[in-house]
Amino acid sequence: MVAVLAGGTGGAKLARGMLDVVGGEELAVIANTADDVEVYGAHVSPDPDLIAYALADVLDERGYGIAGDTWAVMDALAAAGRDTWFRLGDRDLALCLLRTELLRDRARLTEAHARVVAGLGLRARVLPMADEPVRTHVHANGRRRPFQEFMIVDGATGPVEGVELRGVEAARPTPEVLEALTTAEAIVVGPSNPVISIGPILAVSGMRDAVAAARAPVVAVSPFVGGRAVKGPTEAFCAQAGIALSAQGIADAYGDVIDGLVADEPVAGTPALELDTLMDSPAARERVARATLEFARSLAPR
Ligand code: GDP
């Protein structure tokens, strides 16, 4: 069993590679839910969905949503005068509605998302970090914005001045997350944004302790390739959080959470595997996942 902590882009790519290496039965992905949003009456879970779509090989090339999706609902809403800044394809929305319906029937987020994952025919688990709501708010340009509005409406512009993880104190790792951490042979922190993807997961009350208590070695894969983020607003968030755009920056950011680091440059003070971590093809994803798992296995159990 391998547990991968992930946001939506880099973490999802590594998770997809790990699926090739260990198979769905042996994979649990612990996903950030602090980007979740209620829109058009649906509960949208961008990171867990992106991970599930990546694992099911239906992720669209643009990096979110379902490949070949249609836009009839968005077109109809726009024609009726509804602002459609948050674009959800028809099939994507259908799966969000499936989750929303279960949540209205008092299912936990974990159960509701499991239905989406099963609906995609997956055997791997994609586990929300917590069932309680956590919502990232971003301070930038002198104001505070919910995360999706900052990203989509504001175009993620302006230096980030601060990040709030609303609700995180009341959130707890779910029984499913605790079980995945306890039974894992290796725990992999994916190459995701350390501030707004991995940050919320580790900030859930009790999560750091649960990771520390696990017997499995914990290794992180750096999201920086050649000293830059591959995609997205990671650099701006790291600048605000004082995290250097380097392997050392990631090692310092995760501190004693990790036993080892996989990165494309050397790092001092932490066991490290130096490796090209760019996952620009299915073969590259699998190569990085396999090497990361072998590296984790090479570290002594705790
Ligand atoms: P988000 O929720 O969509 O922001 O996704 P994540 O937090 O999971 O991923 C964002 C991070 O993924 C960025 O910091 C990128 O540098 C990193 N990333 C994307 N593709 C790759 C890749 O191929 N290799 C590595 N090492 N990192 C990547």
Image (cartoon, rainbow, N blue to C red):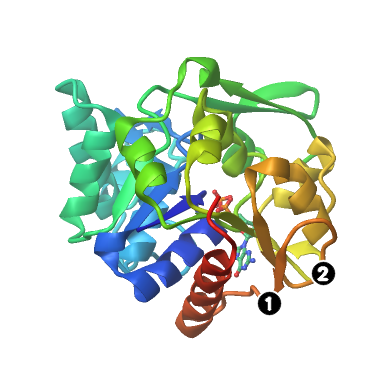
Ligand 1 has an atom within 8 Å of the beta carbon of the residue at disc 1: no
The front one of 302 and 125 is: 302
Give me the residue at 18% from left, 52% from top: 118
x, y (%) of residue 7?
A: 52, 49
The front one of 44 and 171 is: 171
Q: Amino acid at mark 2?
A: Pro
Q: Quadrant of the N terminus?
A: bottom left
Could you give the CA–CA distance between mark 2 and mark 1, rounded to whole angstroms? 9 Å
Q: Is residue 212 left or right of residue 268?
A: left
Q: Amino acid at mark 1?
A: Leu
- Which labelled disc corresponds to residue 266? 2
Q: Is residue 275 above or below residue 199?
A: below
Give me the residue at 78% from left, 63% from top: 228
x, y (%) of residue 155?
A: 66, 44
Mark 1: few/some/many CA within 10 Å (<14, 14-19, 20+): some
Give me the residue at 48% from left, 34% from top: 210
Mark 2: few/some/many CA within 10 Å (<14, 14-19, 20+): some
Q: Is residue 7 left or right of residue 254?
A: left
Which residue extends farthest top?
170
x, y (%) of residue 252?
A: 79, 46
Q: Is residue 40 above or below residue 9?
A: above
Q: SS class of the residue under badge 1?
A: loop
Q: Is residue 36 above or below residue 274?
A: above
Find ligand 1 in the image and state its quadrant: bottom right
Q: Is residue 295 left or right of residue 246?
A: left
Q: Is residue 282 visible?
A: yes
Q: Quadrant of residue 66?
A: bottom left
Q: Is residue 87 visible?
A: no
Q: Which residue is mark 1?
A: 275
Q: Is residue 159 left or right of residue 273?
A: right
